[in-house]
Amino acid sequence: MANLVIPRENIEGGDAVTAGIYQLRLDDFKPKFSKAKDSVNLNPVLKIVGTGNPDIDEKRIFFNMNTGFGPGLTDLVHAAGLEMARVGEDYAIPGKFDGPDDDPTKWVYGAKDGVTLKGKVLQAELVETPSLDDSGKPRVDSKGNVKMRNEIKVFFCVVSGCEVVHSKALCK
């Protein structure tokens, strides 16, 4: 059997980018139930684009988009230039998920009535925060330095005439 070599970034995680405003492309969703199974973590696949820097472009940025946190959903959708879809008295993100109700990991996201978030480019402010382990302690890299990660502080709404009060800090 061949020796399996795993890149350092896959074990320690890649380096955080400098805090600032970036363009993020939404490529897809990787949904799964929350730990309590009372909501769904949609796990959008967001990647930095348009910097012209090959070390930064296509870097994945994590955003905990849970169906239980409506403001975060609305902020992301409005940053894509779309409105939340009305479903009776309730709302849904544009597009649709197809798959079994009891297993979101098998859901496939696609367009509904020609509307989708896939491929949309959003503007967001990224900040650097310490990466924490399961006990809440900062992770350190192989040199003993505190490992930093990026989080989305805010999405910038591009919906014309929007009257929604958007989140000022999506991360802690």
Image (tube, rainbow, N blue to C red):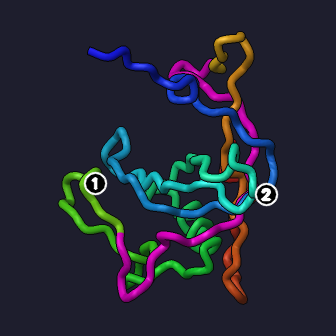
Q: Report which quarter residue 167 is drawn in.
A: bottom right
Circle 1: element type: helix
Position of 160 with respect to 31 (left or right) is: right
Residue 28 image offset from top left, x and y in percent: 44, 61
Q: Is residue 153 magenta?
A: no
Residue 104 image offset from top left, x and y in percent: 28, 54
Q: Report which quarter residue 110 is drawn in.
A: bottom left
Q: Quadrant of the C terminus?
A: top right
Disc 1 residue crowd, few under 14, some 14–19, many 20+, Cα 10 Å: some
Name the dominant secondary structure of the magenta segment.
loop
Residue 51 image offset from top left, x and y in percent: 75, 57
Find the residue positioned furthest to the front.
2
Position of 100 with respect to 4 (left or right) is: left
- The residue where tag 1 is placed is 104
Residue under the point 45% across and 72% down = 93
Residue 91 visible in the displayed image: no
Residue 80 visible in the displayed image: yes
Q: Does residue 57 sit above or below 74 in this rendering?
A: above
Q: Is residue 114 magenta?
A: yes
Mark 1 to mark 2 CA distance (whole Å): 31 Å
Residue 73 image offset from top left, x and y in percent: 53, 64
Q: Which residues are magenta?
A: 110-137
Position of 105 with respect to 72 (left or right) is: left
Residue under the point 25% across and 68% down = 98
Residue under the point 64% across and 60% down = 24
Q: Are marks 1 and 2 in contact (CB under 8 Å)?
A: no
Q: Report which quarter residue 55 is drawn in.
A: top right
Reading the chain from its start, which is encountered first: label 1 or label 2? 2
